[in-house]
Image (cartoon, helix red, strand yellow):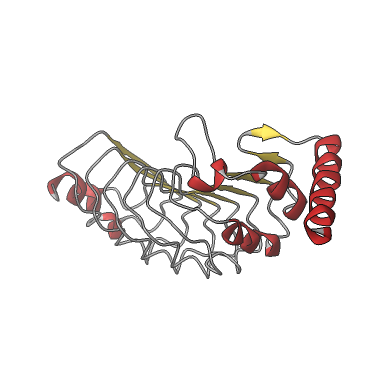
Amino acid sequence: PMARLSSLEHFTNLVELCVMQQSDVDTMSGLESCPALQKLWICECSITEIACLEDLTELREVSLNSNQSTRIAGLGQLAKLESLWLTDNLITEIEGLETLSSLRVLWLARNKIERIGTSIDKLGSLEMLNLADNRIGYFKELLNLTRMASLRSICFCDPHFGDNPVCKLCNYQTYVLYHLNQIDCLDTLAISAESKQLAEATYMKKKMYYNMR
């Protein structure tokens, strides 16, 4: 497998690299030879560990979709990174993203994530987050996104991937639209001003009803 990437030492000025559907590629070793890389796609391979990216500080876009990675790691030095796709992996926890102040797009759909917590609190530029087809099951986890003022689009349910258990809870959409009023797009659909107003009215009515009981 390493032979597939080891020849990169002859292409030290490479700016873009795309490796697709190479099941024998299970390591990222060799990438350190290309410090000028701005766009990196290694998709539908067998990568088990995100590594060898520390010196690739020019990276703007990384896609490691459809691999076998279990952890988000090795991205801490990528201050210029704007887009990160890690869909269809085996990731259980959102971590290692704290220093990515330029990140605008984060796709983590089809993983094994149960919690959001404070993991993305420091991503002050984040505009789009896709967490579809994970294991998030409680409204309290969604409340963590109220701190993300720049967030405009969020997916917990996506027709291409699937949904989270939380999407099946009663009043899911009303709850999200009321609490995450900064977003313009929910689950791939644009949100109108009327939808937000209706969600607010519905939420307040239900709150009054339960308070009076």
In the image, farthest residue toward the front? 213
46 vs 146, left or right, is left
Return the x and y of residue 24 as percentages of the image width and height: 15, 41
Return the x and y of residue 157 as percentages of the image width and height: 54, 38
Return the x and y of residue 118 as percentages of the image width and height: 56, 69
Q: Residue at x 22, y 45 (%)?
A: 46
Q: Residue at x 29, y 48 (%)?
A: 11
Looking at the rendering, which quadrant does residue 77 occupy?
bottom left
94 vs 207, left or right, is left
Q: Residue at x 36, y 46 (%)?
A: 64
Q: In terms of depth relative to the viewer, which is nearer, 68 or 174?
A: 174
164 vs 7, left or right, is right
Q: Indicate whether 110 appears above or below 101.
A: above
Q: Is residue 131 visible?
A: no
Q: In terms of depth relative to the viewer, which is nearer, 23 or 153?
A: 153
Q: Indicate whether 118 appears above or below 175.
A: below
Badge count: 0
Q: In terms of depth relative to the viewer, which is nearer, 24 or 203?
A: 203
Q: Is residue 117 visible?
A: yes
In the image, farthest residue toward the top? 159
Please state, as top left, top right, bottom left or bottom right, where the C terminus lies in the image. bottom right
